[in-house]
Amino acid sequence: MQMPPPAQAALFLDVDGTLLELAPQPDAVTVSAATKALLEHAGERLAGALALVSGRTLADLDQLFSPLRLPAAGVHGLQRRDAQAREHHAPPPPGWHDRLAPRLQTFARRHDGVVVEDKGSAIALHYRNAPGQAEAAIALAEGLIESLGPQTRLLRGKMVLEFMPAGSDKGRAIQAFMADPPYRARTPVFIGDDVTDEAGFQAVNTMGGLTVRVGTIDQSQARYCLPDVTAVHACLRQWLN
């Protein structure tokens, strides 16, 4: 895998499972000082052409990576903060949240270990702590998607089912970053680990960039792979030295 020179690259990083190890629950994740220092160094070497591209909200990312406040796409592109610190938000359709959230909360109360993560503009149902509930969770999700119609997308991640309004994804978020300085005219590099990153891989491939899947590369549009989070950090350190 030949990375483009940092002076010619724009780096986009998924967070959970890519930059940080997965945790049983989203709020159990921590960020080491070394990881924050790596991101700060990356921003300097790339002249600001760096962004996080995550399923987490912008507020959650800011809390995790404090005191850094990085350009980022949150909630799979429904939220975006550009390099000039301007925020762009795509609100859900009226009534969308109220139709969905109560049914997911009821399901979680009735199934031990299932957790609802309410992001406002999207809602995730986590069953990492209740793998035996996978079949029931998937059946619920498929029924809800059918009833909600085309205005809702279902993202199937690693032991998580995420409901979000149609019209945004990580690929579109990366395209939006690439249209503005300091990313414009650079080669995009996107590293992700999950099926929720596939739209980003597709967009970056179309732009002639470099795509990297963390873990298995089977049935992925990513063209390269790294085995784990540790390997991602090592790759970035070597590249950015």
Image: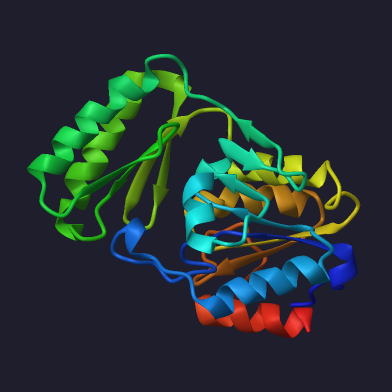
Residue at the image point whose x is 20% and y is 59% from the top: 131
Q: Where, by quadrant of the figure, is residue 77 drawn? A: top right
> Where does residue 143 sit, x and y in percent of width and height?
26, 29
Residue at the image point whose x is 51% and y is 28% from the top: 166
Residue 189 lies, with reference to residue 116, above or below; the image says below
> Where does residue 138 sit, x and y in percent of width and height?
26, 42
Instruction: Report the front residue among 141 and 93.
Output: 93
User: If the image is split into quadrants, where does the C terminus sit?
Assistant: bottom right
Instruction: Report the front residue among 68 and 171.
Output: 68
Q: Where, by quadrant of the figure, is residue 108 drawn? A: top left
Residue 153 lies, with reference to residue 175, above or below; the image says above
Residue at the image point whose x is 23% and y is 34% from the top: 104
Instruction: Report the front residue among 74 and 159.
Output: 74
> Where does residue 26 sit, x and y in percent of width and height?
35, 57
User: If the image is split into quadrants, where does the N terminus sit?
Assistant: bottom right
> Where does residue 142 sit, x and y in percent of width and height?
30, 33
Asked if residue 227 shows in the view, the reply is no
